[in-house]
Each structure stands twice: as structure tokens, then as C-alpha cells.
Amino acid sequence: MYFPTAAAQGIRDPLSTNAFNQALTKSDLGISPQQLQPWPTPLTGGDLNNLAGLLSFNAVPVGLHQPLIQQYNATYERELGLKTSVRFSYLGTTARGLIAGTDLNELRPSDVGWNTTTGDGVTPCDTDAGDCEPTPSQTAALPYPALGDFLLSFGNFGHSQANAFQTQLARRYGSGLMFNASYTYLDQKSTGLDVGESSLGGVAYNPFNPEHDYGQDGWVSRHRFVLYGVYDLPIGRGRKVGSSLSRWADTVIGGWQTTFQMFAKSGTGFTPYWTCDNCFNSDHYIGPGNIATSSVDAVGDFEGGYRPVVVGNYKKHVGDQLYDPSAFGLPPMGADVFDNPQVAKRNLLWGPGAWGVNLGLHKDFRFGERVNATLGADFNNVFNHPLRAPNHDGGDTFSNLGSFSVEVDPATLRLRPSTVDPIVPNPDFANPRQTFSQEGVDSRRTVRLRLRITF
């Protein structure tokens, strides 16, 4: 047996969610005519309570295997003279059999309410009070009625395609200068969900049609420029300026070397989503689509949520928000919860781009043949420029529209948006108010002074 993932916990975690996590208890409830007996006949008599909860675990298929990944490239390189070269490259990647998850106990979306009564099929339940129970016939309709919610399994049904153009201009060190500048254009699409964790794979938003999610990958910038290098300041003995400096003057202002690193990139894709406030209040999940499971995941981060419907022009600023939140409505409540043509596509929104610069200034001091001291300062994010492009820690907040609640229509026993509990908007939706460390550049300016002595 082997682990088809980069980290062992990716397979260990789902396997460890075993079914042996429930309990049966006995107590005197007054139902059995025989009271619970002590030693030497313990557990005799008394009344048996129900399981502490439904059996819940993940299923990892024996035949799960590593994805097939094919990489290919073509490169043209040429020397330009002056220790400088240029390179043009095409890089392609085709992946088949990417690992993704589905919930084995998920029902196809329906307009017919599931778990919308107190269990008798007649009395509407109160979603806020949490007294919703499925009827026996609704429970029997589940693929695995004896098992619980979040019954995840995994398969090799994902695929992706990446095409990249890259150009690079590089100069080898000489005459006090070395640099490497590169630009990359990347078009990367897939059906998979990059959860950014050590996991087998994210859960397909629409497990009945995973291909519907084929599109631009998250956390991938289309345009990216990187520059780094070393430059010896031309001041000091043996250099262009100040070659006749005194030894003391050369010690202070001569012989310094600078290092620099910078990046600039375009924004990445984000999927807008809603969360439900009272869908978890009852013992069994009750939510849009009547799918009988809480594993529905709008963005692939195991946090849950539903994608909104697009009802207006979202491509306009509202105050500090890059997109108009009023252009998004609540998710459909019935059979079209996944495939309504107005439902927001995966990575519909594009976040802000970012750029940052690091700078270093250093000098070596020699004391004889065996002792060397390096004095310098490193300026991380030297311009103190805010990096507004959200990373994995801030992406959920950036794309979260807010939360809503549901209720049962007493006339039809169907689910609908709550008429009592208000929608709670997220003021941070599409609001680039935070700054995030990325590409080796800190989220704020930091200065580090250093003295290193080697002997």
C-alpha cells in the first residue's frame, strides 16, 4: 500500500475517521421492568439509549492512484554578448486522473423538501429551534441510510491543462553586476479544487457534473514578473569612482554591494459564496437543494457554503469594495441549486494584483587572512507598499458575501430564505483592506541590521 499524496496525513486523515466513534449507553428510564443491575451482572436490565450520533467516516477506494501528469516544453536561447543571454520558452502540463471528492450520501437536488418537518411528514419544523427530522421514507431514500453526513469518498475524475509562455533576460556576474529578469504568462484550467492543504482533494461543488467547474484555477496569476540581482556600488578603491580614496574613507563609503529582489503579478481568481447560519441546527442537515448533506463546498476549502446567483453588474466599485455585493443574490433553494445558469462560476472574481521590492546593502571587512566581518542592512518591502492580493489565509474572507438563514414554507413544506432572520453581509467582501506577505516580500516594511564574523 502507498499514499497517493505528497503527505502521509492526506490519506491518514480520511482513514482515521473510522466508524468506531459512537457510543451506546444504558440507564434506568423506567421503560424496562428490570432495573440496571450492578456487578457481577453489569449491563443487565435497564434501558438502552440510541447511538450518540450517526456513523460518520470517509471511504478511500482501494484503486485510487496517482494522477497521470505529462509535462512538455520548447525553449529557444541565445547569447547577446556582454555576458547576457535571452530565453523564450513554452511550457505545457496535461494532467488526468486528478483526485477529487464526492459525498456518497448526497441526494440529487430537488424541489421537494427534505428534513423539513418534525419527522411526521406533516408538521413544519423550526429551522432556528433545530427540531427538523427526516421522515422514515426520506431516510430510506439515502444511498446509505444507516450512515451519517459527510460520507466522503475520492476518485480520479479531475483533469487540468496548463499553458505558459516565459521569457528571461539574464546577465552573469561581471563588472559588478548580475541580474535575472523573467516574465511568465500562465493559462491554467482544471476541474479540481486546490485546497492548499495536505488533503486527497477538494469536494466537487456539483458532484453530479464535476465538469461544470472546469475553468481558471485559483491562486494562479496570469501575469508574473520577477527580477533579482547584485550590483556593486562603483565607489571605493579599485572602482570607477573614488579610486584614490584614503584607506579610512574607503572603509566607510567604499566597497559596498547591493542586492535586490522584486516581483509584480496580476490578481488571482476567487469564487463568491454564502454560508448558512441555521442549516446545522438540527440533528440532520437542512439546506438549499435538499441534498441531505453538509459537505457542499463552494470554494473547496472544507468550510462549506453555496455559490450565489448573479443578478446584476458586479464589475463596479462600491466604496472600498472592488465588486458590487448587491449584484449577487442568495443561492437557489431547489433543484437548480447547482446548475441554474445564473449561479456564479468558479473563480468568477479576480482579486487585486501586487508588487513588492526587497533591497540589501552589505560590505565585507577583512582582518588579516582568517577573519572576515560582514556588515549590512536588509530592507524587506523597502517601499512599504501594501500587498493587497489575498493569500490562502485571506481568500475566504475576500470572497465571502456573508450569511443567510433558511426556513420551511408551512404551506408547501419547501425550503425558502428566512423571512425572520436577516441576511448578514460581510463588510470585507472584495475589500482589499489587508496586506499579505508573498513572493518573499513581507506585508510591511521590515529592516534587519546584521553583523557576521567568520574566522
Image: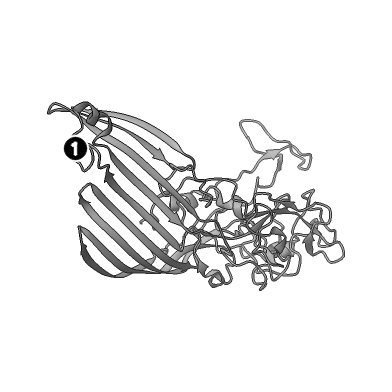
Q: Residue at x 21, y 64 (%)?
A: 79
Which residue is situated farthest in the right direction here? Answer: 411
Residue 132 position by quadrant: bottom right
Coordinates of residue 315 in the picture (x, y in percent): 64, 64
Coordinates of residue 19 in the picture (x, y in percent): 55, 50
Horizontally, residue 412 falls left or right of residue 101, namely right
Q: Quadrant of the N terminus?
A: bottom left
- As displayed, is residue 440 above or below residue 264? above
Which amino acid lies under the numbered mark 1 shown in the image of this protein? Ser
Callout 1 secondary element = loop
Q: Which residue is mark 1?
A: 243
Horizontally, residue 422 falls left or right of residue 431, namely right
Residue 5 position by quadrant: bottom left
Residue 304 position by quadrant: bottom right
Horizontally, residue 207 falls left or right of residue 80, namely right
Q: Is any atom of residue 197 visible in this view?
A: no
Which sits in the foreground, 334 or 62? Answer: 334
